[in-house]
Image (spheres, helix red, strand yellow):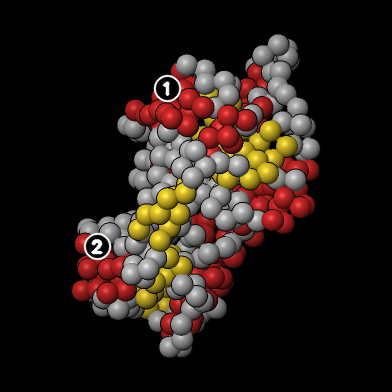
Amino acid sequence: MKTIIYSSKEFEKQYLQRANKRNHELTFVEEALNLKTAPLAQGHEAVVVFTGDDLSTAVVDKLHEAGVKYIAIRAVGYDNTDIKRANGLGIKVANVPEYSPYAIAEHAASLMLALNRKLILADRQVHHHNFTLGNLVGFDLHQKTVGIVGTGRIGTVMAKILHGFGCRLLGHDIVEHKELTKKYNLEYVDLKTLCLSSDIITLHTPLNAATKYLINKEMLDEMKSGVMLINTARGAVINTEQVIEALENGKIGYLGLDVYEKEKGIFFYDYSKNRIQDEMLKKLMCFPNVIVTPHQAFATNEALTNIADTTLYNIDCWANNKDSDNELTCKEEDNKNYVPTPWGKLKTKKIVHKLSK
């Protein structure tokens, strides 16, 4: 099957080529998918996309006009994709529902430790032959209260890691996993209670209508002064402008980000010679108590191998006229999503699509 891979990066090509096993004709393009680049898919049955690609209604229409029958998302998240439109045009869509929860959770833990123990500052000082400790004092993770927002696959691994440090664990999710309570003494609470009680808050939720700006001024006001906030989920789960205000007034004492709500067109690119123009991101990077990494949590050998294998599995299924286990379909008629509210109550709100297996 002729397949075009948008937003392809040199570091991932070897994984995709190895998983392909020469079964399909792969075309790698560095350009992101958008209205301008959609015509590149002409003559290809399948397109492979990433989180920064645009699969809005107009782009899906262009792909359909180009003869595309399949869309393989080499990521978990599909908030950038109009599933309903694709289904309506007969285009099958599949994602990679799991590749390595360890990669993401371990990166989140790394951000916690680097911020707490001021490792970047320490490294800079030592390279300038400054071996003093006065501004390098951190705290023990042991017995600190950590709130895990989203206790799915990644949140579960996060709970295991933090339990190993001896942390008290709070969790917030629509679905409560009893095994986490049994194995790690995790206590499920509403979002307000989690914010009020946590020394550290780590986010592991998908981005959808319910979770966009889940962390906003209202929630920030409820947090402990000096709280540590970690986001390895999606950039728009937090309201960045309001988080910057919380940094400025001292409400947030430490911030670790592997994602940024306006990262499209910035992350994965080299701006070392011409500099970025995003004022909000530049402001974030000026804070000494902030660490920003370029959406790299997934970048481990194991994760990249699993992403490539699952992506090519989806394409293999379609090439053999079979359905993939990972296909995404739209079922609006009775599909409802529980939206978490700060006070622990639950209300319902329609969403566009869900996983269907």
Residue 171 vertical position relative to residue 39 in the rendered view, above or below? above
Left or right: where does residue 6 sit relative to residue 203?
left
Label 2 CA crowd tier, 10 Å (few <14, some 14–19, many 20+): some
Q: Is residue 267 visible?
A: no
Residue at the (72%, 42%) spot, across then down: 162
| Residue where numbered disc 1 is placed | 245
Residue drawn at (36%, 40%) of the image = 262
Which residue is under mark 2? 57
Camera-side residue of 80 and 274: 80
- Name the residue at the bottom extreme: 321
| Amino acid type, label 2 | Thr
Q: Is residue 329 left or right of residue 67?
A: right
Q: Position of residue 1 (x, y in %)?
A: 40, 82
Please state the horizontal and vertical placement of residue 27, each as a whole percent of the image. Answer: 39, 70
Give the amino acid at mark 1. Glu
Is residue 322 something that shows in the picture? yes
Res 30 → quadrant? bottom left
Q: Marks 2 and 1, how far apart in space?
A: 35 Å
Q: Residue at x 43, y 88 (%)?
A: 321
Q: Position of residue 93 (x, y in %)?
A: 39, 71
Sequence-first disc among 2 and 1: 2
- Number of residue marks: 2
Under circle 1, the secondary element is: helix
How many residues crowd mark 1 within 10 Å: few (<14), some (14–19), many (20+)?
A: some
Q: Secondary structure at mark 2?
A: helix
